[in-house]
Amino acid sequence: MYRLLLPGIRLKRWILVNLTGMLIFAAGLWLLLQPSWYYQIRSALWMFWQDVIHASMPPAVVILLGILFLLIGLALVVFGTHRLVTAFTRIANPKASGRQLIGAMLDQRQINTPRLRIVGLGGGTGLSTLLRGLKAYPVDLTAIVTVSDDGGSSGRLRAGLDMPPPGDIRNCLVALADSEPLMEHLFQHRFAEGSHDLTGHSLGNLIIAGLNDLTGDFQEAIQEASRVLAVRGRVIPSANQPLILKATMSDGTVVRGETAITAMRCTVASVDIEPSDILPLPEALEAIRDADIIIVGPGSVYSSLLPNLIIPGMADALYKASAIKIFICNVMTQPGESDDFTASRHLQAVLEQLSGKNPFHYAMVNLQRPASDVIAMYEAQGQRFVEPDLARVLSLGTMPVTGSLLAPTHLARHDPDKLARCILERVAEDIRWPEVLQRQGQ
């Protein structure tokens, strides 16, 4: 321990600041708790000092002086402690911040606290919305993300570098991030028109692509990106290589590629993936097996949810898992994918692809209708409000759980906090685990 006081470590000055602050704080406390101290001390050494204090400082001034000493002492202790924590963090891990150290300490504090293990499957903005809400609760989160996207920045990187598309992965990492806001903005920054080869690329996608090139493994690249963003949870691709989504439309036409499928504006009948013999990551199967809750959705049925579930072995793992399984229905329909779908039809589309077996205990259904101007905006794009036909949902063998789940924005989307609370209230009632409803720090 004495080696910490050797020259060059830069700890002694902050220890001295702490000690000085403690002494000043103690002096202030002494002045406040014993305002008549100068009458009680009779030693010759203190006699002169007592006379000065008694003559020039009335009790009110002594009290004010005591409060001042308390504030100065407390400020020095806080400042010195902060600098000590910073110094120890720099010594232990030069790349870590004080905030990350505190986060690690909080995680260690909660290590013996019962925590629900929640797995979310999906892609697009739906899964990241779910994660953002659940992150505020003391739960262990794992996101299993689809890798079939072939459009935009993700599609260009996928085609050019022969890697899984990073876009949905990036959104989930940012949703679970506990990093500084600047780092989150950096990952989400998208280069504007006129940036030549970078136009349309997300910087986060490029960083993940660079890490993939450095490590030679996509999952390892995600783990490194998770450390950069101080992610509170795990993000796992459903497979370690890109998938090609293949859809059979209602008229019998077969379309390959997610972007081409969504551009068809024709109803999807069923989907498949290529290569058909691809295997899911073992980490994804392990997370499903060990989960307390498994959540599918919200998200595009055919392009975000099913590409995960139709990977060989994933549906079987879902059936065998002892977890409570929840399906989250979308708020609005999507042209081509879910035209005129009700809540039950969303669920039924997934069940049909899973050979009709129903693993879901609950279906979260939104009852809150968007404002009329929002409805009109969506209807102009061929989208409609998903009608909550609860009796039909129940007839499929799934208990509907309802709520007003819309975010207070001009878009018809789930509110992350409302969705998370609705899920956890339902689960807490079933598994008698009410402490999951208490936010961290409260």
Image: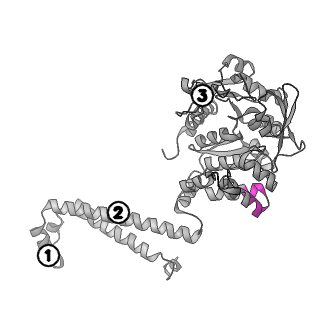
| Residue 231 in view of the camera | no
Q: Residues within 10 Å of mark 3 (few under 14, many from 20)?
A: some
- Can you identify the residue that label 2 sits on? 74
Identify which amino acid the numbered label 2 is placed on. Answer: Leu
- Badge 2 or badge 1: first in the primary sequence: 1
Please report the residue visible at 70 percent of the width from the left and 22 percent of the height from the top: 342
Examine the rendered structure and indicate whether residue 254 appears above or below residue 394: below
Taking the magenta stretch, the answer to whether it contains residue 216 is yes
Mark on residue 3?
Answer: none
Name the main secondary structure of what is drawn in magenta.
helix
Q: Position of residue 46 (x, y in %)?
A: 17, 76
Query: Distance between the Cα atoms at labels 3 and 1?
Result: 85 Å
Taking the magenta stretch, the answer to whether it contains residue 31 is no
Identify which amino acid the numbered label 1 is placed on. Answer: Met
Q: Residue furthest right?
A: 277
State which region is magenta. 211-221
Which of discs 3 and 1 lies nearer the camera? The answer is 3
Q: Position of residue 143 (x, y in %)?
A: 70, 45
Mark on residue 377?
Answer: 3
